[in-house]
Image (cartoon, coloured by chain):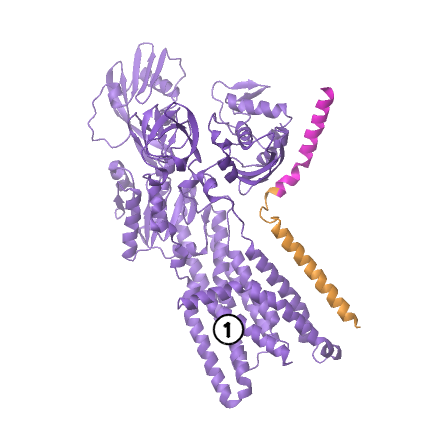
């Protein structure tokens, strides 16, 4: 069997895999809100600060 | 240095700020919010933005209806025994601090397991434990920190909304097919007669066929449906030649590969569908935070407090209100039905309805119309009509609200497509009959080639890309348009009708002119100081207009509700208020709002309030008058007629005392006479006129807050640019016409290949994308140049 069958099969499978991932991403609503995540991403630091303060507080309690 | 703005909300703290932890607050409400955040280690809220908060409002009893089972059912997205998910609309969401605090709600209430903000839509989706907590508790928590959700009748009746993502799926399928077919068709274009290719080309071709099937039958199905509908209605819309082209492409390609005649045009086919869908996608510009479909339901509450015969308060749905019901309206609540005031001091703000910003005082026994908002204390009403039959709401029973404006309008592309389709079909027939006589074997080939190459992809793309781009440019300039068809209709306008109050007048300030005996220095001092203590809107307006004076303590200050103010300072006794209050019998001729003043029981004079018109209105009208008929259609009395005559060009028609229905009829009448009407209004009372007009633009001081159903929303500060915007939409039509010319040139080149029977797949594969892309580039560059001239 020629290698071209394998190459073609692989390329089509890879293509379809990405296509399915795209459909799932759309379906999950990932593209519905394109702004908030960009802001949310920057919050991690404040959250940690809040948590550490919380834990200190609970220790002193 | 004393910073005099509130740490929480940024408002001016006035002369008596409340101090807490070295921070000043304007009121106890703001301080309480700060305390809540402080206790829960959430003061990061203030690090991200300056004074991001809002003053929490008085909400006692307002949300009692949220304990009702059927209302919870409607408001939640998901319910199980232990868990509920609700999406709430919170108008105050405006900065990153808001997102942060709302996504950390679980620190304030441990029963909330997750909260997620959608900034564009200003919503927060809250997941909470429904055993330990309930919707009412969540809403009260949000209100207590200044994020009061807006729950309207719309939430109740619309149910769960679904986002339509079909176009993205179709685009995805077409893009996937297009990309892969391109890869598979490349070898045959460049490696003709290679031995290995001869061996495998059948497999390549059938693979392309397999990829093209979903593109034709799924991605392109809208074009078939639309073409079928068009033909059924005896219309040759642009989708007819497109659907014809796609069908011919697919059939001819399939026959070619089945009988080994050639490689087919699958790449052109997929590319065509892909580009068309990209155009469609580009043309829809949606503004998440705006709604163009609002009616009264978006503003009316879901439930209202009813007082039954034994004096008990119960919460009932507004649809259940019957004639004769006793209703309790609290401060800041909306009156949902026409009613008679029974008890209490009514000060009604009708700005939702008429755009009039000043509140109106009513005495018991007076009739109150639905849509007003109570602004001082609690009142009791007796309903005289049900919700749907009230003065304002019955406007929505008019047929005009169920019609779709877009359907009644033939757009520029479809206008041209009629001639185009007939021309193409005749060329195809002539060319085919010519070949039938000279070389019959080629006849079929030529016939299909003409239909393929003439497929009006470039024409179909001109309008979507021009309008799509202009929609975005306008959006940046705070002129938000519902869809492309509105832009096209805007270009054809010849009559412009303005509402007066709230549209060409400004809500923020008004002018007052004093008329009467001159007040002494001391009297002016007392006047200013007594107005300072009053919260009546007229007092506030007048206070801001008067010159600065020292602050003195008044010996005696008394506000007589619905009448006026009485103040004593040293030897001056000042009465400010209605004519009867100061002891003057006023002739009833005055149509304007007035405030009368008497000092020591001697009548001094009156302040007459005039509307203050937006900046640039006069200039705008002078620009517009050259090309359009101008009309002012106002629901108010004629008090402003003389003022308007001075301000506006003389040919402007001024019509007063128009009810909402009258406005609608006026526009309908002129449309029957052939006028293309642009209506510019702002309140719910203009909703009928906005729907009836060819283009209805709502003016809004704050686009996030309010606008009735309309075709476009214009920020109030941009009203003076209206002329430029109309001009720009007219230029857009010119751009489209030029790009039609451009695409005809491509078609002529393509037709040369087709008619002479030389259309090889590679020619089609180059020519079709090339024409589409050059049209996209041409229209985008032109509209951007157009946009640069706009401010």
Question: A34 above or below B739?
Answer: above
Viewport quadrant of the N terminus of chain B: top right
Q: Residue B682: give x, y in percent of width and height.
A: 38, 42
Which residue lies under the disc numbered 1? B454
Question: B587 above or below B446?
Answer: above
Residue B348 magenta-highlighted: no
Chain A drawn colour: orange
Q: Residue B566: give x, y in percent of width and height.
A: 32, 16
Answer with left or right where residue B165 lies relative to residue B386: right
Residue sitting nearer the eye, B334 or B182:
B334
Answer with left or right where residue B314 lies relative to residue B31: left
Please give the name of the residue rendered at 55% of the width and 18% of the height, measured from the top-left corner.
B19
Question: B316 above or below B183?
Answer: above
Residue sitting nearer the eye, B314 or B757:
B314
What is the total number of numbered labels drawn onto the structure image? 1
Extent of the magenta region:
A37-61
Residue B358: tell me if it is visible: yes
Q: Residue B479: give x, y in percent of width and height.
A: 45, 47
Please give the name of the residue rendered at 72% of the width and 79% of the height, measured from the top-left corner.
B198
Please give the name of the residue rendered at 37% of the width and 18% of the height, measured from the top-left corner.
B529
Residue A48 magenta-highlighted: yes
**Which secondary structure lies at badge 1?**
loop
Residue B91: tell me if it is visible: no
Answer with left or right where residue B261 lies relative to residue B590: right
Please give the name of the residue rendered at 61% of the width and 51% of the height, measured from the top-left corner.
A27
Q: Residue B5: give x, y in percent of width and height.
A: 52, 25
Residue sitting nearer the eye, B739 or B206:
B206
Q: Which chain is purple?
A: B
């Amino acid at each position: 069997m020629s290698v071209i069958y394998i190459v073609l099969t692989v390329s089509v499978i890879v293509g379809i895999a990405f296509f399915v991932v795209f459909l799932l991403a759309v379906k999950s609503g990932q593209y519905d809100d394109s702004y908030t995540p960009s802001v949310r991403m920057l919050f991690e630091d404040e959250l940690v600060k809040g948590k550490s303060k919380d834990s200190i507080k609970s220790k002193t309690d | 240095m004393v910073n005099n703005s509130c740490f929480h909300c940024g408002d001016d703290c006035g002369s008596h700020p409340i101090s807490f932890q070295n921070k000043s607050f304007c009121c106890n409400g703001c301080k309480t919010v700060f305390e809540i955040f402080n206790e829960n280690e959430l003061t990061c809220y203030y690090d991200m933005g300056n004074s991001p908060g809002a003053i929490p409002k008085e909400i006692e009893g307002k949300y009692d209806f949220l304990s009702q089972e059927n209302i919870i059912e409607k408001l939640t997205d998901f319910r199980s025994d232990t868990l509920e998910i609700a999406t709430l609309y919170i108008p105050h969401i405006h900065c990153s601090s808001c997102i942060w605090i709302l996504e950390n709600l679980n620190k304030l209430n441990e029963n909330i397991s997750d909260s997620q903000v959608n900034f564009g839509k200003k919503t927060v989706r809250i997941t909470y434990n429904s055993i330990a907590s309930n919707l009412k508790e969540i809403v009260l928590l949000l209100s207590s920190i200044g994020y009061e959700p807006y729950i309207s009748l719309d939430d109740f009746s619309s149910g769960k909304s679904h986002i339509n993502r079909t176009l993205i799926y179709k685009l995805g399928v077409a893009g996937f097919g297009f990309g892969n077919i391109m890869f598979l068709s490349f070898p045959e274009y460049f490696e003709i007669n290679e031995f290995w290719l001869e061996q495998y080309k059948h497999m390549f071709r059938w693979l392309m066929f397999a990829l093209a099937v979903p593109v034709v039958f799924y991605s392109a199905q809208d074009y078939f449906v639309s073409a079928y509908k068009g033909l059924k209605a005896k219309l040759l819309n642009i989708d007819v030649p497109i659907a014809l082209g796609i069908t011919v492409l697919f059939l001819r390609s399939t026959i070619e590969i089945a009988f080994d005649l050639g490689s087919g045009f699958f790449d052109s086919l997929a590319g065509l569908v892909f580009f068309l869908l990209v155009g469609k996608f580009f043309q829809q510009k949606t503004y998440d935070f705006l709604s163009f479909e609002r009616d009264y339901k978006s503003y009316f509450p879901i439930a209202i407090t009813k007082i039954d015969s034994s004096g008990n308060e119960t919460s009932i749905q507004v649809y259940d209100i019957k004639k004769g019901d006793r209703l309790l309206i609290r401060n800041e609540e909306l009156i949902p039905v026409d009613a008679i005031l029974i008890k209490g001091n009514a000060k009604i703000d009708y700005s939702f309805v008429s755009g009039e910003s000043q509140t109106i005082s009513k005495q018991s026994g007076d009739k109150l119309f639905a849509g007003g908002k109570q602004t001082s204390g609690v009142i009791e009403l007796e309903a005289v009509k049900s919700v749907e039959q009230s003065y304002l709401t019955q406007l929505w029973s008019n047929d005009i609200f169920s019609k779709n404006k877009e359907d009644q309008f033939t757009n520029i592309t479809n206008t041209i497509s009629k001639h185009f389709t007939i021309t193409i079909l005749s060329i195809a027939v002539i060319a085919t009959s010519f070949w039938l006589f000279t070389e019959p074997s080629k006849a079929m080939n030529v016939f299909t080639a003409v239909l393929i190459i003439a497929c009006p992809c470039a024409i179909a793309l001109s309008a979507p890309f021009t309008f799509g781009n202009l929609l975005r440019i306008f959006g940046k300039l705070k002129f938000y348009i519902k869809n492309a068809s509105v832009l096209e209709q805007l270009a054809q306008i010849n009559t412009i009708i303005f509402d007066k109050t709230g549209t060409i007048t400004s809500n923020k300030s008004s002018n007052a002119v004093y008329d009467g005996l001159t007040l002494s220095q001391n009297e002016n001092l007392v006047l200013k100081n007594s107005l300072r203590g009053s919260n009546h809107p007229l007092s506030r307006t007048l206070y801001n207009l008067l010159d600065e004076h020292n602050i003195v303590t008044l010996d005696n200050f008394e506000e007589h509700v619905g009448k006026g103010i009485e103040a004593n300072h040293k030897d001056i006794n000042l009465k400010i208020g209605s004519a009867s209050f100061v002891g003057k019998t006023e002739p009833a001729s005055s149509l304007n709002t007035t405030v009368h003043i008497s000092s020591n029981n001697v009548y001094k004079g009156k302040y007459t309030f005039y509307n203050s018109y937006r900046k640039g209105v006069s200039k705008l009208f002078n620009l517009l008058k050259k090309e359009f008929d101008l009309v002012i259609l106002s629901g108010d009395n004629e008090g402003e007629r003389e003022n308007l005559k001075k301000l506006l060009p003389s040919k402007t028609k001024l019509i007063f005392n128009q009810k909402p229905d009258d406005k609608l009829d006026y526009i309908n009448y002129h449309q029957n006479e052939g006028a293309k009407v642009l209506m510019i209004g702002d309140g719910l009372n203009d909703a009928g006129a906005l729907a009836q007009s060819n283009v209805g633009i709502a003016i809004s001081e704050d686009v996030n807050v309010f606008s009735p159903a309309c075709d476009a929303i214009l920020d109030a500060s941009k009203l003076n640019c209206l002329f430029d915007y109309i001009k720009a939409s007219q230029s857009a039509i010119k751009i489209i016409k030029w790009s039609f010319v451009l695409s005809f040139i491509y078609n002529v080149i393509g037709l040369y290949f087709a008619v002479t029977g030389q259309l090889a797949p590679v020619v089609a594969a180059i020519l079709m994308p090339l024409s589409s892309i050059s049209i996209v580039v041409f229209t985008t560059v032109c509209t951007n140049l157009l946009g640069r001239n706009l401010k």
